Amino acid sequence: MIKNILANLALALAYVVLPLFLPWWSVAIAALVFGYLASNGFRAFSQASSVLALVWGIWVQMQNVPNGGLLAGKIGVLFGGISAIQLVLITAALGGLIGGLFGYLGYSFKRVMSK
């Protein structure tokens, strides 16, 4: 239990710190490394996915709140009239998908290398 919590905190820290110095897709590298270290494929996908979705959702909401959702609302109009909160949820879901797929890819690399 403690091991999972520490892994999630380390992964969240990597998801926050890496994009400060590297491009946005550096979170995929962190998920790949985490997936390589994971004990099974489900854990690699689910933990990398849920942590990145949570981090990106919080990050986007922190950017959205100070301007009252004005920018997200204008971008939502460009995408067919979706609301600001829907745009935040879509961003979090895409982050979760990226994290999960790269986490599972890292686990798959480990399985291929062990054979």
Image (cartoon, grey):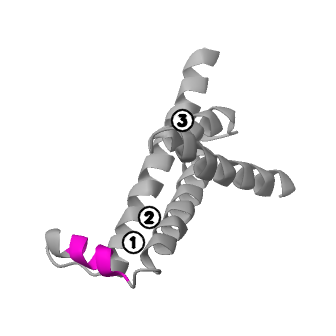
Which residue is tagged 2? 92
What amino acid is labelled 3 in the image?
Ile
73 shown above or below 1 = below
Secondary structure, mark 1, is helix
Q: Is residue 96 left or right of residue 6?
A: left
Which residue is tagged 1? 88
Asked if residue 58 is among those painted magenta in the image, a careful observer would answer no
Extreme residue in the front direction: 67
Q: Earlier in the sequence, mark 2 or mark 3?
A: 3
Q: Residue at x 50, y 61 (%)?
A: 56
Mark 3 to mark 1 CA distance (whole Å): 23 Å
Extreme residue in the bottom direction: 68
Task: Return the x and y of residue 15 as percentages of the image width and height.
Answer: 59, 49
Task: Return the x and y of residue 89 as percentages of the image width and height.
Answer: 40, 72
What amino acid is labelled 1 in the image?
Val
Q: Which residues are magenta?
A: 69-76
Q: Earlier in the sequence, mark 3 or mark 1?
A: 3
What amino acid is labelled 2 in the image?
Ala
* Front-most of residues 23 and 80: 23
Task: Assign the magenta stretch its main secondary structure.
Answer: helix
